[in-house]
Amino acid sequence: MARLDVPTWLTDAMDRELYRHNAFRISGLAVTATPRAVRRRVSEARAAEALGAERSGGPAAGESRWLPPDPAPDHIAVREALRRLEDPVRRVVDEFFWFWPLPESDGAELKQARNAWERLAGSRTGDAGDPGGARSIAVHNLAVLHHAEALESKAFYGAGTRRTLWERAYRYWRLVLEDDGCWHWMDERIRVLDDPRLRVVDGTVLREALPAVLLDLHAQLAVDAARSKGGEDVALQHVSLMWGFTVNDGLADSKVVNDATVDAALRRVTAPLAAAVRQRTEAIPGPGADPATLDRAADSLLTETRADVRVLRTVLGPDHPVPADAADEVATAVNACAVACANGLSSDRSTARDPRVSRAAAHLRSARMLAASGHVRDLVEQNLAVLLSNDILLDCKEAVERGERSPRGGAERASRLLDTVEPRLRELRELRPHAPETNQVRDAVAMAVCRLYTEYVNTTRDIDKALAGYRRVLPHAVAEEARSVIRQNIDTLTRAAAARSPYDPAPTITGIPGQCFRCGRSVGPSEVVTVTRADFSDAGSIAIPCCVGCRYDARRLLEGAGLSPEPLPRYPAGYRSHAAHRGSRRRGGSLRPVVIGLMVLVGALFGGALLVGPETTVGKWLSGGACVIGLFGMAELMDIWEKRKK
């Protein structure tokens, strides 16, 4: 059974540069080199360095020619490699991950050595338990060769070549794990070195921990690929190859590596990323911080953790608990910052339009996409819905207030309001499709737009634009009351548009204040006159605003246009319009009393002027008044005469 952890003395092997830093590869010594041979190699290196040679002597073993270091090691690298060999624990690790001597391949070129190893590895002779068995050594050397080629494969290698190298490496490592002869050989090497410091080193422990070491090395490559731009596909291929290590291809007797080993290796390699994410989320400011600090904290947290969360999801899988927990931690922290920032700004009308409120909504959208758990996503969606609702209602309130100050711009303002809020309404319906609050916001938008178009059409008499606006806003209304009001206005304007002629005054929406179509004075709902078009079979009533003082003149105009006004209402006590007075005078009969009265008044004024003297001030005032009254009187008499002739 493979170990899920790695002993401390094996951690040096968990290095992507495992073979590049191998002491035997750099020094050129064979793995069976005696301490005396090591000391001699140290002396050669020192002499070469003293003489100024570029290299510290040529390789001493044929194995070094199979995978020569590139570039060639300098004096410092050679000294470090020889120093490693003085440590028996590190030497045992380097011995295991380098070529073991075999008479059939010693001194041969790599191609001939590979052929010999493959021939011996394919043999099923009974030397598997022999510590010095040729088959065991051949299997081990093939595993080392293919593993080194896979780890050091060039970046331009295609996916097929990369897969072939790793599949061969894992195939032979599975054989090594099953071959007792390999581990007997390793135990014998520990016994030959005979160093007290090797008491902690055991071949059995190495055998159990080897899968974790190999998988950790591979997981680091997957993480590096996931970090690079556009490297997700390469990372996923590496992870797939790691899971392939658990496959029993029939060469080994059993499944020596299980899924738990692969998962443990992926967790170990990605643990620093998860810890970094957790540390950043714990460092966010509290809800009492100022909005600027909270805004920056949410933005920086998303920026700093996005790459780490993406790597975790790529390497471990989106459904793995580690990336899911990390994503939920980031989403929860960003949600807290965004909500606190929006609350701090929205509480004051002067800062409700601060750009940081919009950024808070953007941060919540990012948190929603990050969230992995349902309860975290629901929390973020609920807060985002509240923020969108408040923002939409504020837009409606501001639009209505501006519309009241400038009714003629109501249509443009209503259209702009719909263009602005419709994307947010769609998002709100996606977040909370059946919530009562969503329906309330939709009704608020519908009524705000309805009010803007109503004031617009009452001011400008532009039926077509108002009718198009009502039809556009109708789908947004949910409550039957709101839909009824909009449909009623649509019906009224539709009938008015069908019945109008170039000479017809445009109607006003029933029950809505407007301006008198005669004098322009503001009128209330009670002063709207309902008239019917008499020349249509499907007669429909329309409403025309008209003040009380213009009712009689309006009646004649409406009747002349083929409209049938409803009976005029009674006038309030003590008040009659100017038109009514003129009508009563017309019905009064003779003009003689009026003429006689004016003549007597003018004569009296002139007589008074003569008595006091025309040259005096009083005389001048009396004569001037007589002239003015005479002129006004003549104008009034002429007006009455003309109307009476009609």
Image (cartoon, rainbow, N blue to C red):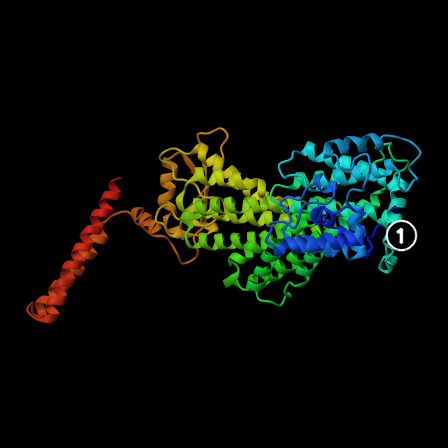
Q: Nearer the viewer, residue 94 or 161?
A: 94
**Residue 241 point in image, percent of width and height:** 75, 38
Counting from the top left corner in percent of width and height, residue 382 is at 67, 53
Please give the name of the residue rendered at 39% of the width and 44% of the height, measured from the top-left corner: 460
| Front residue of this view, candidates 155 and 23 | 23
Q: Nearer the viewer, residue 129 or 116?
A: 116
Left or right: where does residue 553 sit relative to residue 268?
A: left
Q: Between 584 and 118, which is closer to the camera in this rendering?
A: 118
User: Does residue 561 lie above or below 440 as drawn?
Assistant: above
Q: Is mark 1 on a helix, strand or loop?
A: helix
Question: Which residue shows up at 37% across the image and 52% down it?
Answer: 521
Taking the image as shown, residue 318 lies to the left or right of residue 128, namely left
Quadrant of res 160: top right
- On screen, residue 61 versus residue 398, left or right, reads right
Counting from the top left corner in percent of width and height, residue 339 is at 62, 59
**Residue kind at label 1, given as amino acid type:** Arg
Looking at the picture, does residue 150 appear above or below residue 444?
Answer: above
Name the quarter where the C terminus is drawn.
Answer: top left
Number of labels in the image equals: 1
Instruction: Tell me, yes or no, if residue 413 can be seen here.
Output: yes
Up/down of 249 relative to 294, above or below:
above
Say which quarter of the image contains residue 137: top right
Mark 1 sits on what residue? 191
Q: How many neighbours does mark 1 have within 10 angstroms: few (below 14), some (14-19), or many (20 or more)?
A: few
The answer to whether one can see residue 386 in this image is no
Horizontal and vertical percent for residue 622? 14, 66
Indicate left or right for 538 with 19 as reference.
left
Farthest top residue? Answer: 537
